[in-house]
Image (cartoon, rainbow, N blue to C red):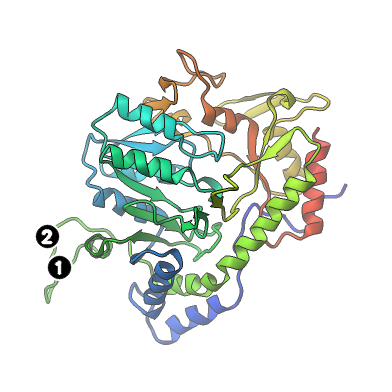
Amino acid sequence: MEAFKNKVWLSSPTMHGEELKYMTEAYETNWMSTVGANINEVERITAEKIGCKYAVALSAGTAALHLCMKLAGIKPGDKVFCTDMTFDATVNPIVYEGGVPVFIDTEYDTWNMDPVALEKAFELYPEVKAVVVANLYGTPGKMDEIAEICKKHNAVMIEDAAESFGATYKGRETGTFGTYNAISFNGNKIITGSSGGMLLTDSKEAAEKARKWSTQSRENAPWYQHEELGYNYRMSNVIAGVVRGQLPYLEEHIRLKKEIYQRYKEGLKGLPVSMNPYDEENSEPNFWLSCLIINKEAMCKQVRSDNDACYITEPGKSCPTEILETLAKYNAEGRPIWKPMHMQPIYRMNGFVTREGSGRAKTNAYIAGGGIDVGMDIFDRGLCLPSDIKMTAEEQTKVIEIIKSCF
């Protein structure tokens, strides 16, 4: 088998032409800063698509999450419950405000926050008043259960829908379940601006606060008057032009991503693997990334340090490291699953709660005192597959054959 002539990407931007039209409009009208028609339209269209009252266009999804933390009133020393298996952009904004993340383990059904572990966490830390929930790889978590637990304990729910724009749970768009919510337009997302993000809320007061904070907290005065800390977080009108040109293609991108997921699911039948799961009865992911997890009995020996990995090949068995290295050899890009936050050097001393209770992870994916560390287990056995919507069916068939060769 020959390597791909053109690289097959994990998830790269897919442009359509309208993006350039709106960027050029910003250029020709000289609205190149953080004010302009593109920003206004992006906010209006996004709020309309998602079904929330207010959208605030910002420089990044991380900026949106940071302002969500401020709106939730996170103060230095406050513990905040957070999804464990996620990118650290979900977590870092808690620390920006001096908060202390406590990580909630993952469940196998959707690879998202485990509601049982969340309820257990409130028993251990009843003082907690904020919960940050991420939807992994475009798949909604058990949103009703999590929202009900937050309500029961009077905790503010913040939804990190950075990866799940366009996904629905029981017919409701992700990015609307929290009091404050965030989406991302980063270069690899299902809709991109090359950068950028959005804060979503039904609270007019919250939207106005976020908009003010994002423009250095300028007061309504004829000069630069500042009475509270502000940030340079507003989206540029040029970036907004890219997002504006992309937004009409959201449904098409989701359809193409779903086709990729289904081709993998069909093509990998017969191998000791399964795809990243979702609640088929209640949710419709945006299928941003297609992932697989190898059955336990089909794992060859694999060891990972903080920076390196090695494995021993065995007939009929494989591991994420072998598959990723083989894909790379053929010029195709895959990725490991997000390494859980409680395993990260920066957060190794933070609290971590499984459905069995509190504990710190051992290297064999089990918790002291009993019970499996689900996030560590998925990280150990899972990987993200090439999911670029410009990948042809023929290229994907070859990717599937490469994966089969590893077993």
Distance from Cα at disc 1 to Cα at disc 2: 7 Å
For this view, does 305 lie left or right of residue 83?
Answer: right
Where residue 127 is drawn, which disc sits there?
none
Is residue 62 visible in the rendered image? The answer is yes
Quadrant location of the C terminus? Answer: top right
Task: Name which residue lies at 37% across and 27% down.
Answer: 120
Q: Is residue 155 left or right of residue 371?
A: left
Which residue appears at 51% of the width and 60% of the height?
166
Residue receiving disc 2: 227
Q: Nearer the viewer, residue 215 or 382?
A: 382
**Is label 2 in a helix, a strand or a loop?**
loop
Neighbours of disc 1 within 10 Å: few (<14), some (14-19), many (20+): some
Q: Amino acid at mark 1?
A: Glu
Q: Is 273 positioned to the left or the right of 173 in the image?
A: right
Q: Residue furthest right?
A: 1
User: According to the image, label 1 marks what residue?
Assistant: 219
Relative height, residue 37 to residue 258 (above, below): below
Q: Residues within 10 Å of mark 2 (few under 14, many from 20)?
A: few
Q: Is residue 5 visible?
A: no
State left or right for residue 345 relative to residue 53: right
